[in-house]
Image (cartoon, rainbow, N blue to C red):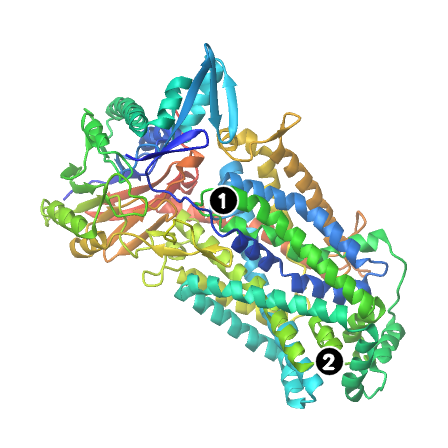
Amino acid sequence: MSKRRLTIFYASDIHGSERVFRKFLNAAPFYGADAVIFGGDITGKALIPVVETTPGRFRIELFGQVHEVEPGAALDEVETRIRNNGFYPYRTTPDELAEMHRGPDHLKAVFSRVMAETAERWVTLADERFRAAGIPALMMPGNDDEPALKRILSQGDWIVDAEGRCVELEGYQVISFGYSTTTPWHSPREITEEEMATTIEGLVAQLDPARPAIFNFHDPPHGSGLDMAPKLTPDLRVESGGGQLLLEPVGSRSVRAAIERVQPVLSLHGHIHESRAAARIGRTVTINPGSVYGEGTLQGALITLEGGKVLRHQLVSG
Amino acid sequence: MATTAAGGHFQRQATGLVREAGTWSTLIYNVNFISIGLMMMFVLQLEPAFYPGGNMLGSYLLALLIVLPTSLVFAMLAAALPRSGGDYVYVSRILGPRLGMMSSWINTIWWFIYGGVPSAFFARFGLGPLFRSVGVISGNQGLVEIGNWFVTPLGTIITGALLVAVLVTVFSLGLNVYFRIQNVLFVIAMVGLGLVGLVLLINPAQAFVTNFNTYWGPITGSPDAHQAVIDAAVAGGFVETPTDFYWTLIPITWIYLELVFNQSSAYIGGEVKRASRIQLWSMPIAAVVSVTVAMALTALFQATIGTTFIGALGWDPYLADAAALGLPYAMPFSELAAYHAGNIVFALLVGIGFVFWSYTWLPGQILNASRNLLAYGLDGVLPAKFGSVSERYHTPIFSLVVVGVLSVGALAVYATNPDFTTLVGIIAFIVSFMIVSIAAIVFPFRRRAVWEASPIAWRFAGIPVITIVGVLSLGALLVAEWAYLNDPLSGVNILNGLTPILTAEDGSLTKDTVRFLIASGTVVSGLVVYEVSRLVRARSGVRLEATFAEIPVE
C-alpha cells in the first residue's frame, strides 16, 4: 500500500471541446496534481460544414448565424470557435454537402474520419504534454465515443487506455470501464445491466483485495446523487412541473452493487453532466464532477490519497 | 452511427436532451414567485392610504419599466449560461468567485430572513381573512374567532411554522410530487383572481356598500359601517390629493418587491437544450402578464369599491381606539370581493385562491436557499455536510432543514417585532441585482468565447446588446434603490430626495438608519463567509481559490 501522498485530477465528458481538452492537458500542473484520469466521452456530437461556395470564400452556419469568410485569420477564428464548442469544422464543397444530405453512408464516413483525425491529434498532444510533465494519464472512451476511439487511445505511447483492465497507479489499482447502461438515445457504447454486472465482475476479479482500489466507471452508481437527470417522456421531452425540471436517478445498479461490495477507496464517474456531486457509499468516496463543456469550462475533481485512503477531495471548475 | 441534419450542422447519435422543458411550466414558476395576489394586496392596502397623490395604475407601469431591464439581464444570462444556480453561476463565471459568493449570499441570507414573511402572510392574509369573511357572511361567530386567532402573533407563528415544516418535509421526501401539485395550486389561485374580476364586473357598485353594511354593521355597531370607516380615517388624518408623479413613483417599492422576482427560473436553468428560448421570453413575459392582470383588477376595484374607501380601509388598523373596524391588519382584496359577492361559496373559492397567493414566495425561497447551500457545500465554501444529498430521497435534507429552522426563527421575529419591516431586505437584493447587471455589461468582453457561442450574441450599433441592457438595468436599479431609501414605509427611509436623514432630532441613529446598516452588513457578509472559509480550508490543505480559477488554454 502506497504511503506517499497522491493527488489525482479527474474529469470526463468534454465532448469534443478543444478548449476544454487543452485545459485538461494543463490541469495537473495548474492544480499541482500528480496524475490525471479521464472518465470517458471525448468526442464531439456535431459536425459543422465549412463550405467553399466560391474559390477562396467559405460559408459557415454557426449558432443560427451565417458567416461568409475568406481563408486566413477570419476562417481560422471561426473554425476555432467551432472546435472550442465541441463541434467539428469540416471543409467541404457544395457538391459534397449535397451528398452528405443525400447519403447517410457518406455522412457517416465523413463524421468517422473527422472524429478519428481529431482524436489522433489529441492523443499526440496528450502524449507530448503529459510525458514532458511526467504525469501519468489514464484515459478511456465513454458511451458516446465510437468504438474506433478505443483503438486510437491505445496508440498513445504515454497516455494509457485504461479501459477493461487493472492499471497500477502509484500503489493503487485502477479498474476502468466506459460503457453505460442503455439510454433513450442508443449511443454507441451501451450495454444492459446484466452485461455491466458481468463485465465489472471480470474487472473486480483482477484486483488484489489486500491493496487499495480505484473505480473509474463512466456510469455513476444508481441512487447516489451522482446520477440525477431530467425525467423524460417516451418522445424524449423533458418533464417539468411548477416550472421545475422533474429529476430521477438514472445510474447503474450494477455499478452501485460493485461499489457496495468491493468498497474501493475512490469511485470516479461522469455521464450525467448536470449531476455534479460527491457522496459516500459506505467507505467509498464517489465523485461525479459534472460537465459544462459547452461553456468552455472544465469541471473536475482533485482527490488527494494517502495511506490507502482519501485524505480530501475538491470539486473544481476551471 | 446514425446521423441527422439539423440547421447548419450534422448530429450523430449520442446522449443529450432533445426537447425543451414545459414552457408554460416555466412561465408559471416565474408568475408564482411574483405573486400577483400579494402585489395587488400591498398596492390596494397601502398606496391610496399612505401615498397621497399616488396613482396605483401609474405605479404598476413605472415598476414594470424599472423591472424589465433587470428581467432581460437575467433572461439573457440564463440563455447564455443555461445552468442552475442563477447569479451564483453568472457572477462567479464572469466576475470571479468572491463577487459570485457576495451576490449569491445576499440572496441566500435574505431568503432565510424573508422565510418569516410569507409564512406570516399565510395566516395573516390567507387563512385569517378566509375564515373571517366566511364567518361574517354566514353569521358564524366561531369561524370569525378562528379567523381572528390566525392573525394574532401566536396564531401567525404556529400556522406559519407548520407551513414551513410541511414544505421542508415534502421537499425532503422528493420534489417531483410537489412540482406537479404546484401547477394545480396555481390554477386555483388564478381562478380565484378570475372570480374576483367577475364579481367586480357583474355586481353593481352599490352592492358592495349594502353588503358591507349588512355584514359589518352589527359588528361595528354602526348601521352605515362603510361610511364609518371613511369618517374614522378622515378624522385620523387620511387625505386624498390630486395625482402626483413623485408619490406615484415612490410606492413602486411594494410592486417591485414581487415583480423583480420574475427571473426566478434563472435559478433552475439546468442543462436543457434550447432553454434559451424559454428563459428569454418567460421572464419578461411573466412580469408583463402579472402587471396586466394586477392593473385590470385594480382598475375594477377602483371603479367598483372606490379609491376613497380602499384608502380609508388601509388607514383603519392604524387608528387604534378610533378605528371603525378594529382589525389588526387591513382586509386583503379577496375579502372585499367576498363581501361584494355576498355569497359563502364565492367567499370560500376566492379566499382559498388567495391563501395560495399569500405564501407563494415561500416554496421558492426554501428551495432556492437550500440549493445555494448545496452549491456552497459542493464548492467547499461551506462544510461538505451542506453539499450532501439524501441517498434515499435524493434531496439535500440537511440544507432544507437548516433553511426551515432559520425561516421559523425569522417568522417568530417578524410576527412579534414591528421593527422587522417587510421591505428592509429588498435594498440588499438590489445590490445583488446590480452585481449581476455589471456581470452582464462585461460578459461579452470577459467571456467573449462563451458570449459569441451563445444565442444572445447580438449587437446594436456595434455594441453587444447584453451590455446595453446591463447598463439600462443598472440605471433602473439605482432608481429602485433611491425609491426604497425615500419611501417612508420602507423601514430604510434614510434619504429625502438625495439628502441623507440618518439621525433623529436627539442625534441618535434612526431605526431606519439602523435597519439600513444591518441590510448593508448582509451585503458584504458573503465576502466575509468566503474569506473565512478560504482560511479554514487552507489549514486543511485545500486552496478554495482553485475551485473557481480558470485553467489557462495553451
The subunit carrying tag 1 is B
- Look at label 2 and name its amino acid: Gly
> What kind of element bears circle 2?
loop
Marked residue chain, label 2: B
Look at the numbered disc 1 and give the secondary structure of its residue: helix
Say whether residue B450 is visible.
yes
Mark in front: 2 vs 1:
2
Q: Which x, y percent locates residue A211?
A: 12, 47
* Residue B275 - label: 1
Looking at numbered disc 1 in the image, what kind of residue is underneath it?
Answer: Ala
User: Which numbered tag is attached to residue B188?
Assistant: none
Mark 2 or mark 1: whose residue is earlier in sequence: 1
**What is the x, y in percent for residue A109?**
28, 25
Q: Is residue B386 above or below residue A73?
A: below
Quarter of the figure with residue B544: top left
Residue at image location 79% in from the left, 80% down from the top: B212
- Find disc 2 in the rendering and name its residue: B342
The residue sitting at 18% across, 24% down in the picture is A157
Which residue lies at the image location 65% right of the left edge and 34% below the top edge? B468
Against A185, residue B250 (above or below) is below
Instruction: Locate the C terminus of chain A by quadrant.
Output: top left
Task: Name the foreground residue: B270 vs A87.
Answer: A87
